[in-house]
Image (cartoon, rainbow, N blue to C red):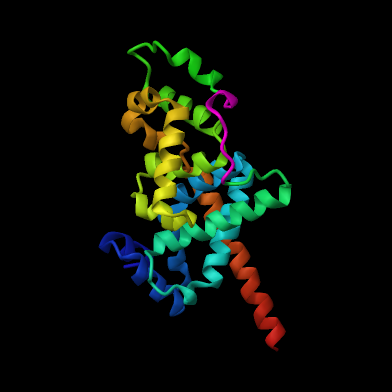
Amino acid sequence: MEILEQARIEGWTDEKVVERVLAGETALYEIIMRRYNQRLYRVVVAILRDRDEAEDVLQDAYVRAYQHLSQFEGRASFSTWLTRIAVHEALARLRSRSRMQPLDTEMEEEDISLDAMSAFVNPEETTSRAELARLLEHSLMNLPEQYRSVLMLRDVEELSTSETAEALGLTEENVKVRLHRGRSLLRRDLLARVGTSARDAFPFMGQRCDHVVHRVFVFLSAHCRNSIEHQK
């Protein structure tokens, strides 16, 4: 049985996959990427508000994580460790644009553009899950970054408060405050009506997922060849 198929069928833990990757079975890194592509994409796009740039950052985050796999000490879950790397890469990209808002800047509700939600005051009962998910995407992207990233992890990815705090480098109290404020800005009835459709928002599957996996392996392969040549 091929090692990738075996890992999927047996449901290997992140820690076991990482251990085998560090032992030289680098192909297994694909398991990690496909397992977390959607979560990392969602949190990165919440920070950058640019889907194409989010893909680039996702690639950079996976490469950086691969290069530092041996530094994973297990004090937090691997998924949290990986998410923190993606958040760090996204914020670094944001700073390089010189467009980053201070994370602690508070904005009044009337300062937030929520025009996209005006049509949602009395929605048709026949509105599909896909339409609701698209509406959620549009509305969530109009929030300030400090609320977007928290809502993305808590309400879309359904992480716990402690997991979200660890991933974003915040206190749990700060996460709770931002979550409350963000939900208020997004309007509670929107999230309530979307319900489980929140998990349909910001999909990152199929060809886009394959593309990132391929790009990461191409980069890592080239990096390994260069390292070997320099050692000769």
Q: Residue at x 55, y 18 (%)?
A: 115
Q: Residue at x 68, y 87 (%)?
A: 231
Q: Nearer the viewer, residue 149 or 51?
A: 149
Residue 127 rendering spot, x and y as whole percentages: 38, 16
Magenta-drawn segment: 104-113
Q: Quadrant of the N terminus?
A: bottom left
Residue 49 rendering spot, x and y as whole percentages: 60, 39
Q: Compared to 111, does 37 lie above or below?
A: below
Q: Quadrant of residue 184?
A: top left
Q: Nearer the viewer, residue 54 or 24?
A: 54
Q: Report the predominant secondary structure element of the magenta stretch.
A: loop
Residue 3 rendering spot, x and y as whole percentages: 36, 68
Magenta includes 111? yes
Residue 55 rendering spot, x and y as whole percentages: 59, 48
Q: Quadrant of residue 99?
A: top right
Q: Residue at x 48, y 51 (%)?
A: 40
Magenta includes 160? no
**Visible residue check, residue 156:** yes
Q: Nearer the viewer, residue 160 or 198?
A: 160
Check the image and name the residue furthest to the bottom: 232
- On screen, residue 67 versus residue 176, left or right, reads right
